[in-house]
Structures are given as structure tokens and as C-alpha cells.
Image (cartoon, rainbow, N blue to C red):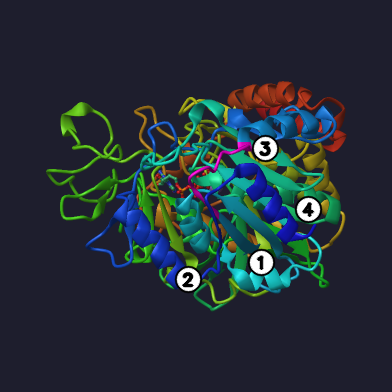
């Protein structure tokens, strides 16, 4: 497709007042930010140079999974876990929604690259949007600018986004326009293209992120034999100077950013960050699995981030950062629950009004976020921009589970590891609209992000395992197990390095493990300087796991013929091991 013709067609459809082709320069960023400041949409922060605060419409605070569609020709190809719509029908709906939707606004055209420029992994997109907030975020989150257009040889992924609020002549804009009643985020994997209407928030509007780098990319990855995953990538170096890379998939707001930027509590260990949310992985000619981070910045959860939990994130956001839906202090700094200080009097809540500490409501929205360039991270990995990626030694899955699941367990082999991925379930968080705390299946932490039938996706993972004899080992972790009083059993954050150390040493065949019905468990962890009883953390109850397996059996039925028999065998073997274990 010729991008110039496409841009003209979209302008014709959306009827904006102006078209602005983004060059991606700092001057452009500053000028758009200055204009938003003059409209009081952004507030400059006094304590953090180059940083701004803003807050969204109260009904535009998270991803909206119920309005997210995969529009492939056959319903079965979207699978039982996605909303499906016939492509022609969706196109008809989109045509009427987008007709004239940018009246009175500027239409920004954002050329961007996911992945290092020139990398064989990288893919190009163009996002059209009427939201200046989206332009600023895309500048931080992607490699964006005119230079990208020169890279386009034949294909790019077109994405059209509108907040869905046209302006009448002379009408004054609102600070955060959005259209909650008409929201739709539609993906056409076979074209491919992305259309998003009605929301200005994060994963709904920054189309390079979840829409392209996961939903569209997962389909490309299946067709081209690679993996597009909701995973962080970290480098870990032991006291002897040996370095390995680990990728980890946890559902939204379950600890990826924190693990990716971890400050180790064990002396001599070092962690460096390649990426905090998305990994694109393919086998190299040496048979190892190589990963890149397609993003260039972090869109991270603010609440809970402090000098104690994640000092590297705090240093990263000391300047040139955007803050969305955190609280604003009277001296123009940001504040959130868990930042490590008391809320100052006169705090402005994420809703933009004076916060009442007695209201019982948080000052910052639980899904409040910072947007910041990865380059500002003091532990940005030196190989993070390597166009060939970094070699992965271990893959970790995990979720938020108050009970049942131990701190860490190792899979027996690749198929058992794929079974780990397929069996992820987690308590829901504020990152998506829904019932917070409710346990739901979230296979591979990809439930909201897999662009095709999840059963076929399981099979793709199994097929990938046949392509190499140097596969990463696979683990399952749970930082969130609680005691009878509801207190976390594990201190988490920097202490998670103790688990990473075991994984590191297992992948060098240096750490012992013991057999359990669910996989290999550590015989011991390095707990130096920590007073913790590992018994409860590693307790595997045959009865609880039998229930878990039963529940999984009924979940897997959902995938009908698409469910790989190998994973049903894994489940059967788990059940057998559990019943033998019970007899002992
Ligand atoms: P997305 O950006 O939505 O994909 O989230 P994420 O997976 O990157 O999660 P993030 O690291 O931002 O963590 C989400 C929340 O979990 C934050 O409030 C953290 O403070 C909390 N958290 C992260 N790691 C740990 C941990 O090891 N233990 C405990 N108890 N909480 C954690
Ligand atoms: C997530 O929800 O997993 C995020 C934030 O990383 S968003 O960009 O909104 O998808
Ligand atoms: Mn995420």
C-alpha cells in the first residue's frame, strides 16, 4: 500500500482541520507539549525537568477488553477467548464512526518502528491519531519520525485512532476528549490494520503497543515462525561476571516492570533491563532463542513504585516523563499510593480536584502510569538495542495467586513448560476494566493480547520447541502467595533475585532440585540475610492441585479441536502424579 494515498483517504474520511506529518523531533514534541500546557491539558512539573502531569476522563482509565475485537474471516480463527466480528461488518461500522470524527482537530500522522531501526526483527507502523497526548506517548514509546518512512519498502501496519469527539466550529475542546459509549478497538490481522475509536488511554490508543506488537504481531509470528509475547527481558550477571538473559510473562500489573528493573539484594549480582512489557523472539542460526524489545520506553504502573520497591524506575522518571492519573502535589510534584511518603496536604487527586484523605478513595488511580524513555533507565542493558537481540536462557511464567501456587517451580521439559504457560491464571488488576481480584485464566499472560485462536497459539509454542535443541528452560513463579492473615509470604521486589539466582544456576546445571508432582522445586534458596520460612511458600497441596487440575481440564475444553493433545496429556500426567503423591 502507498502510504501517501492511505493518508489522503483517511483525511478524506475523518475530515480533520489540519494534517500534521510528525517528524519525531524534540522540537515537535516540545511544541505539542507547550500547546497542551496552554490548553491546561498538561501541567508542567516543577520538581522534574521536562515532565508533565495529566489526568484522563474518569471513564477512560484502562484497557477495555469488552470493546476489543479480532476481525478475521472465520470466527473460529479468533477463538473462544477473543471478541470476534465479521471484517466487512466491522468495516461498515468503522466507516460510519470515523466519518467526520476529526472535525475541528489536527490529524497527526506518526510513522514509527517497533524494534531497533534496521533490525531483522523490526516492523514498521503508521498511526494516524487526533490525540496530541498519543503523539507525545508514541514519541517516547517507539522509534518515531520521518526517518522511518524511508525504511518502508513494501509494507507497514496502518493504524487509525480517534478519540471520537468531533468539534463544531468555534466549540471549545474538553481537556480529555473521549467517547465511552462508542468505543471500539478493532484488529484485522489478515490485512493487517488497526482501528481504534473512543478512548485516549494507553493500550487502547498507543497502537504500536498491545494492538500491533502483540495482537497483530502474534499472527505474523505464527505465520513466520517466531514469538510475539507479553514478556519483560532482563540481563542477569552473577558475582563471577557470567551473564544470562531471562524473559518473563506475567499478566498486566503483576510485576513485569518491577522484575525487569530489579535491584538485587544479593551482593555481587547485577540485573540490567532490555524491556519491561513485550518481547519478540526468534531462533538464531546457533539454535538459541533471541529476543528484542520492540518498544523504546516504559508505560509503567505508578502506584507501588518507590525508592524501596523499584529505585531504578524512580531514577528513570526523575525527568522528562509523562504522568497520567497520579496525584499532583501543591508544589507541583507527583504523588501516589506506595510512593514511600505521606500524602501532603492540598493534594490534587487523579480526578483533578482536591483530595479528601478521609474519603477512603485513593488519590492516584490504581492504574495510573508513567511514560518514560528506556534510555533514562540507569540499568538500561548495553545490548538492549542490539539488532540481533539477546539470547534467552530461561522463560518464566507467573501470576498473582494468593494460594496454591509455590514461589517457583521448574518444568520437566519444553512441552511441560508450554503447559505452564497455558495454565497461567491470575487475580485481575486495575490494568483492564473488570472485577479486580477475581481469579481468571490468562494463558501465557496473553489472554487479552493473542490475535488468533488461543488453542492454535498453544500449538505454535509446541511447534517452536521442535526447532531447536538449545531451548530455554521454563519456570513458573508466584510472588503473591499470602498467609492466613492475608499478608504476603514473600517480600518480593529486590528479593526476587534469590529466585532468579536459582534459575540462573539451574540453567548452568549448578543448583539442585527435588521432584514434585508439579515440577522441580528448589531444595534450598539463598536466603542469606532474610528471615523467612520457606515451608508455606513451597507447600504443594495434592488436594488443592487436584482442584486446580480439574478446573484446568474444564477450561481446556473451551478450545475444542484446537486444543493440542500434547497439553491434555500433560494435564493427565499431572493428575496421575498428584494421585500417586497423595498415596505416599
Ligand atoms: P503492565 O504494565 O500492566 O503490563 O504491568 P507489569 O506486569 O509491568 O506490573 P508492575 O511491575 O508495574 O507491577 C504492578 C504492581 O504489582 C505494582 O503495584 C507493584 O508494586 C506490584 N508488584 C510488582 N512486583 C511485586 C512483588 O514482587 N511483590 C509484590 N508484593 N508486589 C509486586
Ligand atoms: C497492560 O495492561 O498490560 C499494559 C498497559 O502494559 S496498556 O498499555 O494499557 O496495555
Ligand atoms: Mn503489559
Q: Which mark is residue 375?
A: 2
Q: Which mark is residue 508?
A: 1
Q: Earlier in the sequence, mark 1 or mark 2?
A: 2
Q: Is residue 391 above or below residue 459?
A: below
Q: Which mark is residue 221?
A: 4
Q: Earlier in the sequence, mark 3 or mark 2?
A: 3
Q: Give the residues in magenta.
A: 98-107
State how many labels appear. 4
Q: Residues within 10 Å of mark 4 (few under 14, many from 20)?
A: some
Viewer-proximal residue, 298 or 535?
Answer: 298
Image location of residue 85, percent across then percent down: 74, 28
Residue ID at (69%, 62%): 124
Viewer-proximal residue, 40 or 510?
Answer: 40
Q: Earlier in the sequence, mark 2 or mark 4?
A: 4
> Which callout, 1 or 3, points to the residue nearer the camera?
3
Q: Residues within 10 Å of mark 1 (few under 14, many from 20)?
A: few
Our reading of the magenta stretch's main secondary structure is loop
State the SS at label 3: strand
State the SS at label 1: loop
Amino acid at each position: 500500500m502507498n502510504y501517501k494515498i492511505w493518508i489522503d483517504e483517511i483525511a478524506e474520511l475523518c475530515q480533520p482541520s489540519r494534517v500534521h506529518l510528525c517528524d519525531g523531533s524534540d522540537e515537535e514534541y516540545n511544541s505539542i507539549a507547550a500547546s497542551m500546557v496552554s490548553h491546561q491539558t498538561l501541567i508542567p512539573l516543577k520538581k522534574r525537568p521536562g515532565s508533565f502531569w495529566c489526568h484522563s476522563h474518569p471513564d477512560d482509565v484502562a484497557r477495555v477488553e469488552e470493546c476489543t475485537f479480532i476481525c478475521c474471516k472465520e470466527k473460529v480463527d479468533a477463538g473462544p477467548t477473543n471478541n470476534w466480528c465479521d471484517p466487512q461488518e466491522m468495516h461498515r461500522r468503522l466507516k460510519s464512526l470515523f466519518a467526520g470524527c476529526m472535525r475541528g482537530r489536527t490529524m497527526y500522522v506518526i510513522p514509527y518502528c517497533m524494534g531497533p531501526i534496521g533490525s531483522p526483527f523490526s516492523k514498521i507502523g503508521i498511526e494516524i491519531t487526533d490525540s496530541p497526548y498519543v503523539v507525545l506517548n508514541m514519541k517516547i514509546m517507539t522509534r518515531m519520525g520521518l526517518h522511518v518512512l524511508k525504511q518502508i519498502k513494501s509494507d507497514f501496519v496502518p493504524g487509525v485512532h480517534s478519540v471520537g469527539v468531533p468539534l463544531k466550529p468555534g466549540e471549545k475542546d474538553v481537556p480529555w476528549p473521549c467517547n465511552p459509549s462508542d468505543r471500539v478497538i478493532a484488529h484485522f490481522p489478515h490485512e493487517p490494520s488497526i482501528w481504534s475509536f473512543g478512548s485516549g488511554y494507553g493500550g487502547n490508543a498507543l497502537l504500536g503497543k498491545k494492538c500491533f506488537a502483540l495482537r497483530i504481531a502474534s499472527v505474523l509470528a505464527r505465520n513466520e515462525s517466531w514469538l510475539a509475547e507479553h514478556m519483560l527481558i532482563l540481563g542477569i550477571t552473577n558475582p563471577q561476571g557470567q551473564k544470562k538473559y531471562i524473559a518473563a510473562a506475567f499478566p498486566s500489573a503483576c510485576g513485569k516492570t518491577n522484575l525487569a528493573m530489579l535491584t538485587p539484594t544479593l551482593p555481587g549480582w547485577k540485573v540490567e533491563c532490555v524491556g519491561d512489557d513485550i518481547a519478540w523472539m526468534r531462533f538464531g542460526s546457533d539454535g538459541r532463542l533471541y529476543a528484542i524489545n520492540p518498544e523504546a520506553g516504559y508505560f509503567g504502573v505508578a502506584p507501588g513504585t518507590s525508592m524501596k520497591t523499584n529505585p531504578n524506575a524512580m531514577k528513570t522518571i526523575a525527568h522528562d516523563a509523562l504522568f497520567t492519573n497520579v496525584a499532583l502535589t501543591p508544589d507541583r510534584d507527583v504523588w501516589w499510593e506506595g510512593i514511600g511518603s505521606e500524602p501532603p496536604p492540598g493534594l490534587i487527586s487523579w480526578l483533578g480536584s482536591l483530595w479528601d484523605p478521609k474519603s477512603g478513595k485513593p488519590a492516584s488511580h490504581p492504574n495510573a502510569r508513567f511514560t518514560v524513555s528506556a534510555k533514562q533507565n540507569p540499568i538500561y542493558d548495553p545490548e538492549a538495542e542490539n539488532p540481533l537481540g539477546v539470547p534467552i536462557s530461561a522463560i518464566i511464567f507467573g501470576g498473582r495467586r494468593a494460594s496454591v501456587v509455590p514461589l517457583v517451580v521448574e518444568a520437566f521439559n519444553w512441552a511441560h513448560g508450554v503447559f505452564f504457560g497455558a495454565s497461567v491464571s491470575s487475580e485481575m488488576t486495575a490494568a483492564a476494566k473488570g472485577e479486580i481480584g477475581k481469579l481468571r485464566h490468562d494463558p501465557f499472560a496473553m489472554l487479552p493480547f493473542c490475535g488468533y485462536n488461543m488453542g492454535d497459539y498453544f500449538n505454535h509454542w509446541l511447534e517452536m520447541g521442535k526447532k531447536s535443541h538449545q531451548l530455554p528452560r521454563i519456570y513458573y513463579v508466584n510472588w503473591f502467595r499470602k498467609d492466613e492473615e492475608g499478608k504476603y509470604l514473600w517480600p518480593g521486589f529486590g528479593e526476587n533475585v534469590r529466585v532468579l539466582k536459582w534459575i540462573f544456576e539451574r540453567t548452568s546445571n549448578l543448583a539442585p532440585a527435588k521432584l514434585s508432582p508439579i515440577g522441580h522445586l528448589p531444595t534450598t534458596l539463598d536466603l542469606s540475610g532474610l528471615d523467612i520460612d520457606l515451608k508455606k511458600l513451597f507447600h504443594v497441596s495434592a488436594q488443592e492441585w487436584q482442584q486446580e487440575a480439574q478446573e484446568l481440564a474444564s477450561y481446556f475444553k473451551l478450545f475444542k479441536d484446537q486444543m493440542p493433545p500434547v497439553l491434555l496429556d500433560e494435564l493427565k500426567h499431572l493428575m496421575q502424579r498428584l494421585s500417586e503423591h497423595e498415596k505416599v
